[in-house]
Amino acid sequence: MGNKDTRQFVIIGAGPAGLTAAYELLKYEVGATVLEQYDKVGGLARTENYRGYHFDMGGHRFFTKSEPVNQMWHEVLGDDFLRRPRLSRIFYQDKFFFYPLKTLNALSGLGVWQAVLIILSFIRWQIFPYKKEETFEQWVTNRFGKRLFEIFFKTYTEKVWGIPCSELKAEWAAQRIKNLSLKTALLSTIVKPGNSITTLIEEFHYPRYGPGMLWGEVKNQIEKREGKVLLNSPVTRIHRTGNRIDSVVISQNGSSEQTITGTHFISSMPISEFVKKLDYVPADVLEAAQKLRYRDFLTVCLIVNKMELFPDNWIYIHSPEVHVGRIQNFKNWSPEMVPDSSKTSLGMEYFCTEGDELWNMPDHDLIELGKRELGRIGLAKAGDVVDGCVFRVSKAYPIYDAEYAGYLKTIRDFVDGLENLQTVGRNGLHRYNNQDHSMITGTLAVRNLMFGEKNDLWSVNVDSEYHEEIQHQGKEKPADTLKEKITHSFPRLDPVALGFSLGATAGLLIFAATLLLVMHGGVTIGPHLALLSNFVPGFTVTLGGSVVGMLGLFVLGFFFGSIFAYLRNLAVFIGARVLHRDIELYHLRRLFDFI
Amino acid sequence: MQEDNTAIERFVLIELMRLNGVILGLVLGSLFGCGIFIATIILLVKGGDVVGPHLALLGQFFIGYRVTFAGSIIGFLYGMGLGFVVGYMIAGLYNWMANFREKRSLRNK
């Protein structure tokens, strides 16, 4: 009979990362106390409820390339994990456009003159691109041209982020579209030909009553076994001694305080908030924490007295005349999100910043705004809306502005020194990742703390090919395996080496052939081989001629071998570039999937 | 560990290729052997007063080769053998030179 594990895990945040960490701990029969500030679990992936209507905050498609994550979802949900068709469109200039963008549909929808200008702009930016791609604007312009960027990317992206695209770092787009890296793009076509790169295109899985159903069930399983999940328990203070966290203080139901001690801590709360609540933080770290920025959003949930409104799961609203950024049709996510089948529930998502005009607007005014804008877009009449409510989601998206990387590094360097702490999840890492990515960070955090593994949560990648390597207890470094695979797929032919080998071989062959004929003798020796003198001046079918032939063929062989290698390398480079560009455009047409 | 995606050159065409001598030998041998076999058969089928006077010159190097059906088999075998040797030699010389140049370039860094 073994000794009971005396480690006590405290997990801050009951979102996907925190709950997955607690779920992972169940495997090792180690209990955890999970602390959640809200009245329900799910974090940024929570599902709100109003009069029996379920509202998914943000819309969360369940798709992953990670097999362990997929297994967990199926394990927890069983038959309540539905397969749903996906349809979404873009609304702009009073028209709907296919999403992902289709070239002909986009151009024909915008009109002939606009289409011509877009094509000319595209060509111009292909020939004279921005030399450095530091901002999102530069990054997209180099790939789509300025005009298309301004039409399809600028307005929506600035609605989401509230800052000009010229201030949004290019890194954000590249990180969101993880598979845009040439390594992964090439690997997926070469190592596993025929496999498509990450796709969220045609269908996805979804819990019957929204993501909250999954996380609620995970909470139940945690509580049935060694764990506790405390709701309405925001962390107000974090105590440490030296490089170890000792305890956290929570405020329960807004009144009393309680101290929760632990041996190991996992935090998914925004890292800036974590630092502000921690004891004895250096001034520069605190200052960096103040400078990290977030984007928030609120959802105006409308119940519409119509059985069906539109077939989309959601619609991106690019039109600058309305504030709403995205409209969710929850009935199309799962019919059971709506208790009354004669009605439809919509989520009008407004991107804003905590404390700004939209955020502070009274709920009643927001509902009226939502109704007006719904009518303006033409999806429903304001008079058909029978009820509504508002939910606010704070710190939904970390902002990658011009300076964030420096501030985050300062914070990270400090936090990494706390030996019994792991930060996880989107806000714990200030990294705009998806639900499955957050779950993986939760799992790896547990392994780091339980077994001393050195998984780097800051650069976890959900691509399953590489995740398998991460799972091998950190023994293989994904980056090295990638490099090995890619360099075996696209190595370089050395022109000098190939020229030398072909020249030497050809020279030796001619030398041997000439000598053979000379030894053979005869009245006329090698009359046909002698024709080689047309190409190798001075060649004769004699002993001396064999040496001349050898040297001559060496030069010719070297020349052809070098040219062959050079051209082959050039073709590979062009092919790789074309492939890279194709993959980039493939993903760029789906960029809004990742916002 | 953050991937650096700024330049394609960083990921493609970095490492020098190495050639596999056996594979290259087999490929070239197959090409040469089949080439001689098919060329001989084509000339035989074409027929004429004198069949393949120029191809017959290969008999000076490939003892026993003639522009006949049996000769096509002999030519195939010689072609396989010679092609294998040529391919193996090209690969061996290429790898030797590539190693030499790589070591020199590492020494100079």
Image (tube, coloured by chain):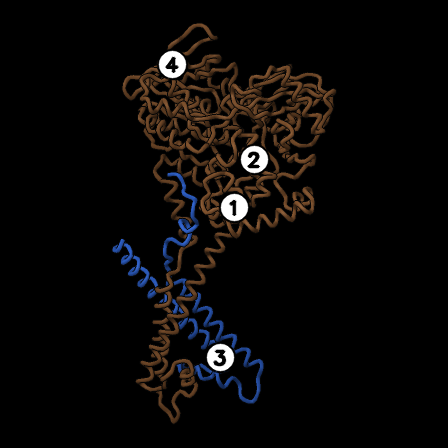
Chain colours: A brown, B blue
- Residue type at mark 2 is Asp
Using the rendered image, report if marks 2 and 4 lie on a common chain: yes
- The answer to whether residue A551 is above or below residue A43 is below
* Chain letter for the residue marked with disc 4 in the picture: A
Residue A297 is situated, as x and y percent measured from the top left of the image, at: 55, 24
Mark 1 vs mark 2: give the one in front.
1
Q: Which residue is mark 3?
A: B70
Along the line of sight, which residue is nearer the eye, A155 or A265? A155
Determine contact: label 3, label 2, CB under 8 Å: no
Specify few, some or many for label 4: CA neighbours under 10 Å numbering under 14, 14-19, or 20 or more.
some
The CA distance from mark 2 to mark 4 is 37 Å
- The answer to whether residue A571 is above or below residue A551 is above
Mark 3 vs mark 2: give the one in front.
2
Q: Which residue is mark 4?
A: A237
Q: Residue at x 69, y 47 (%)?
A: A112
Q: Which residue is mark 2?
A: A593
Helix, strand or loop for disc 4: strand
Quarter-of-image position of residue A312: top right
Specify few, some or many for label 2: CA neighbours under 10 Å numbering under 14, 14-19, or 20 or more.
some
Q: Can you tell which mark lies on residue A482?
A: none
Using the rendered image, report if marks 1 and 2 lie on a common chain: yes
Q: Earlier in the sequence, mark 1 or mark 4?
A: 1
